[in-house]
Image (tube, rainbow, N blue to C red):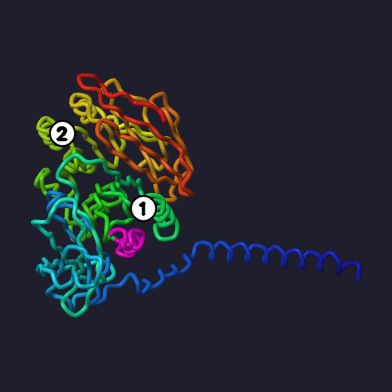
Amino acid sequence: MDSLLPRRVLAWLVVLVMTAVLGISVASSLQQTPSPQTPPPPPPSWALPTPYPDRIILTWSDDPATTQSVTWRTDTSVTKAVAQIAPAGDGPNFTQQAKTVDAQTTPLQTDLGTAHYHSVTFRDLKPNTLYAYRVGDGTYWSEWFHFRTASDRPQPFTFLYLGDAQNDIRSACLRVVRQAFLHYPDVLFVLHAGDLVNRGDRDIEWAEWFAMMGWMGATIPSLPTPGNHDYPRDAEGQRRLCAHWRAQFTLPENGIPTLKETNYYVDVQGVRIISLNCMEQREQQASWLERVLEDNPNRWTIVFTHYPIFSSAQGRDNPELRALWKPIFDKYRVDLVLQGHDHTYARSKPQPSGTVYVNSVTGPKMYKLNPQPWMHRSAQDTQFYHLVHVNGNTLRFEAYTATGKLFDRFEIRKRPGRVNQVVDR
């Protein structure tokens, strides 16, 4: 019996070793076998087109005092769309004065199927006048919305500036936009500094963006400029403007012809608003910008673009863009440059030319701040909206957090024959 003990121990050791080896082998095999990818959930019903108009958005493509553009979406069953407009009235009989305008229809193939986008530009409107309008096909109609045309002279106004929305738009960015409109509903327009969505070729993300804008987008004009995420990569890895952009936004075509509706300017109540497309043809835009600034009858000039001239996030810089465009801003004393991309907040110290640069973010995606000498005020891990008030020789900029707290405020004061004065308030 004693002679059998070592043999039994040895046998058990062999079994234990083999079991351990087998277990390691099985575990390794399981780790190397890819788990089946979870398919994305089906799109919610509110994201899919129907015969009823949705994604209704006001933009400007011509004179804001006498025209107003509107774009909307339906399913493909709507092949002939129209819009109706009338001066807004206090009672329901205003509809008796409604005029009907035929829409242009564009099919758009998306990853969720094909939809029809329709657009109308109302013309021959009266300045500073409240209008009511609706869109549809004669059977399926939207509700009546109001909008007010701009004045044809330099009257005081306020606009809303939003940084990147980009990620988790419906769940985390919408609250900021709602707070902005609750805070100050009487804005003349909304300026979007690029990266409206994260993947410009994903229709569900645009569904979230339009859910964020909601009825506000149908009553207050938007002016967007594209960012890198609005330029998804194609099969060859090249970035191209997403197909949604021109289908759903009716914007000016007074920029470089190959960059229509992304590089443009609008003159409104004494301010020239200029969109620079940072994604392509930068040198050509520099030449165009010279001409647009040289022949500028407006008191104020505001540029908005996505990539910042001065970066505020860690590991980012745009020296080529700065070398190309900043000397032109300096030469013509551009008053304010509004930007996105860096997912932080930063306001520059006044430049020798008097220009003030602002980077900001509205959505929940955040980067680490890279403090630099050019900054006067900065923040990280904070969502913002901004109100810009223009009144005569004074422009007042206010930055508010998602909960409506004032974070930064300054004034730019025009001084004839001298550089602008920038004053903290």
Q: Position of residue 170 (x, y in %)?
A: 40, 60
Secondary element under disc 2, as helix, strand or loop, is helix
- Residue 93 is marked as none
Residue at position x 22%, y 55% from top?
A: 148
Q: Nearer the viewer, residue 310 or 317?
A: 310
Label 1 neighbour load within 10 Å: few <14, some 14-19, many 20+: many
Left or right of residue 374, residue 381 in this image? right
Residue stretch rendered in magenta on the structure: 202-217
Q: Residue at x 34, y 54 (%)?
A: 198
The residue drawn where x is 47% and y is 65% is 34
Percent across and percent down for residue 373 are: 41, 23
Specify whether 283 is left or right of 373: left
For label 1, the residue is 166
> Mark 2 — residue?
286
Residue 404 in the image, given as x and y percentages of width and height: 46, 47
Give the residue type that dot 1 points to. Gln
